[in-house]
Image (cartoon, grey):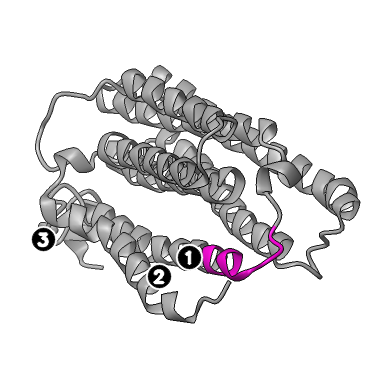
Amino acid sequence: MSEAAVMHPDVEAAESPLTPESWGKLGMWVFLAGDAMSFGGLIVGYGILRHASSNWPVPSHVLGINLTAFMTFLLICSSVTMVLALSAIQSNDRKGFRKFLLLTILGGLAFLGCQAYEWTHLITERLPEVGLSFTTHLFAATFFVLTGFHGMHVTGGVIYNICVLIACLRGRYGAKHVEIAGLYWHFVDLVWILIFTFVYLL
Amino acid sequence: MADAHKEPNYIGVFWWLLALTILEIAVIYMPMARMIIVILLVGMAMSKAALVGLYFMHLKFERVTLGLIALTPFFLCLFLILMLRPDIHP
């Protein structure tokens, strides 16, 4: 790193194409496009296996949708608190920023808690009851792969948001870092919207 | 964001997302043909995804090329479905 870059950490080497305000934002968008292809491949694979199967159960009958609808509500709320956190830090409202980012983190943790409960309930009670073990039926296997892959993203997002919150409170990060973290968090919400429809409702 | 712009009505977007989620759940209990239910559910899911992308991720206010990067995986998934379609035998 050059001496100038060390002395002025906010100064970037040259203006980023597409996102003049930060290279990091362009990097996040490129990463998200790649990550979306991973999710897209999994969802398309799920759809094809389901379409080709003659004994695929009705997901809402097996999984139930009340808890998942609540989980969707949680993620939508946490997306709203994330944009409100960004809005607060952009207008130098440190207290509001701290409150909204903390609520976002809590929303993510609540989502993970609900998912842990759902998985436990499915593995120990519901799936054995309907004879759909995840080692013997593609329905359960694809369900756990998809929701597990998403759950890992939520876990990563919660850790990322905690790191951003700490760095902002120490004055090392600013609005542009929060915006980049927000992109990731909204992406996780967006993917869940699709999983909720394609895996639970359809 | 690419240019300074008026802040979107985030709470308004939240109410739209909530309303669409409630409608989605209502649709699966409606006595309609399966194909209509599928079209409605996919349409509502895409609308919700578009709301999140356009307003929460600020794509509406970014350069068009960035939007095209964001849409690339969607087109590749459609391509994947078309390529695999001949091999699907229900």
Q: Does the magenta stretch include residue A109?
A: no
Circle 1: element type: helix
Q: Main secondary structure of the magenta part?
A: helix
Q: What is the three-letter code of the residue carrying label 3? A: Ala
Which residue corresponds to mark 3?
Answer: A14
Which residue corresponds to mark 1?
Answer: A44
Q: What is the three-letter code of the residue carrying label 1? A: Val
Label 1 vs label 2: CA separation? 7 Å
Chain name for mark 2: B
- Name the N-terminal-most of marks 1 and 3: 3
Q: In the visual, does A143 lie left or right of B23? A: right
Which residue corresponds to mark 2?
Answer: B81
- Mark 2: few, some, or many residues within 10 Å (few <14, many ≥20)? some
Relative image position of residue A12 (x, y in whole percent): 17, 56
Label 1 vs label 3: CA separation? 39 Å
Q: In the visual, does B67 lie left or right of A100? A: left
Circle 2: element type: helix
Residue B89, above or below A106: below
State whether residue A6 appears in this view. no
Tell me what residue is drawn at x 73 percent, y 42 percent.
A61
Residue sitting farthest toward the bottom: B87
Chain name for mark 3: A
Q: In the visual, does A170 lie left or right of A123? A: left
* Image quadrant assignment for residue B12: top left
Chain name for mark 1: A
